[in-house]
Image (tube, rainbow, N blue to C red):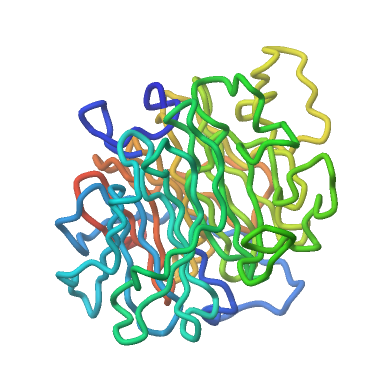
Amino acid sequence: MDRIPHGLRMTLAAVAALVLACVCPARAAPLSEPGALPSGTRARAPDFSRVEVGLVTAMTGFVDPILLTNAGDGSRRLFIVEQRGVVKISKRGQVLPIPFLDLQSRVLSGGERGLLGLAFHPEHVRNRKFYLFFTERAGGDLVIAEMRASARNRDRALPGSFRRLLRISHRRNANHNGGMLAFGGDGLLYIATGDGGGGGDAKNNAQSPTSRLGKLLRIDVDGRSGGLAYGIPPTNPHATSTTFQREIWSLGLRNPFRFSFDRRTGDLWIGDVGQDRFEEVDRATKASGGGRDVNFGWRLLEGRACFKPRSGCNRAGKQAPLTVYDHSEGCAVIGGYVYRGPIEMLRGAYLFSDVCSGKIWSVVAEGAARQRKVLMADTDLHITSFGESETGVLFVTALDGNVYRLTATQR
């Protein structure tokens, strides 16, 4: 980004050196929740204003950690992604001395570029496959690639297994790459791309049907369509179109650096980084289609306000954010997760943050379509991402090189 509000800078020298899995039912069974109501029964919305989140140092010594995830294979391992192109493993509470993967020879890192996303195949325990989102060393294009873990040692990636699935041109500007990958409960891979960078989406990529930028894409990594290295799911909204890119699932996004799926409901949550004024959190419920063909509004809208034009913009067919905040409270939203872990008082809270302010907020995951966020913690960290363990324990990564585990107490 041209400044922190324009994207997620990845070096604290430039203010912040930052600036990316869903654990789906196919990968790990949802946690049971004591006292769960029968399907269709509406419970009273929880009051998270009475809960305070704390952070406990869980791991240290990383270089620009920007993502934590798990393999969903029952191993309880945590995978920590470093922006420079290295993935490390925490196993039984210890960070292994040899990285799972070193992709530095392929990755262009710095600013908002780098190794940004990692997701494990829902059948990883059987096929050993995992997927990467990174900016390519030879120019900065966005690359989605497949690799496998070694059959002899699951704690090491197999170097010769690299297979590029998709390359998206992104050479004009270094910022707004997006970067998140996650498998949905449908077993398909979702990919978040930024609008191409610069400022103001000058080429209107986010609204363009012919561009894969500024979108949420959806592909079948186990299939093939024509000459593609992946399949186009037939249920994609433009699967047979001759005018739209067929991978498009949702559009109208500026820089969706982090998104996630609620492991209990399947609802889609996106933290979309704003321009000069507003940051936003978007929700698309599974019942409403899970984001299928949803237009989130950028560049016509920034948050709920007109952006281009500044007034009188056409809001028809655009989905408004669930919550918005202005730049008096931060500069770049970090989308998080709906908490479904072992801390009962946090269950049902969607937790998110901001890389500049370090604040952690919540909204009610199954609450109204428009909400005010609730402050859960006020930290001095530059938080870069949230991450889940297999059992739903929630962590954050930060630019100080540490990984923190979330705790909670009653106020």
Question: Residue at point 39% right, 49% down?
Answer: 376
Judge whether residue 409 can be spotted in this image: no
**How many tags in the picture?**
0
In the shown orientation, is residue 175 left or right of residue 399? right
Residue visible at 70% across and 51% down in the picture: 247
Q: Position of residue 230 (x, y in %)?
A: 64, 63
> Does any portion of residue 294 appear in the rendered image?
yes
Q: Quadrant of residue 132?
A: bottom left
- Closer to the camera in the image, 143 or 353: 143
User: In which quadrant will I find the N terminus?
Assistant: top left
Q: Residue at x 42, y 70 (%)?
A: 161
Residue 53, how many percent across, how many down?
A: 34, 55
Query: In which quarter of the view is residue 160 placed?
Result: bottom left
User: How far across and how far down the image is residue 111, in percent?
Assistant: 33, 33
144 sits to left or right of 44: left
Quadrant for the C terminus, please.
Answer: bottom left
Q: Nearer the viewer, residue 54 or 352?
A: 352
Figure check: 361 above or below 140: below
The one of 245 and 46 positioned closer to us in this rendering:
245
x and y, in percent, of residue 297 in the image: 69, 32
Q: Residue at x 73, y 76 (%)?
A: 39
Q: Nearer the viewer, residue 367 or 79?
A: 79
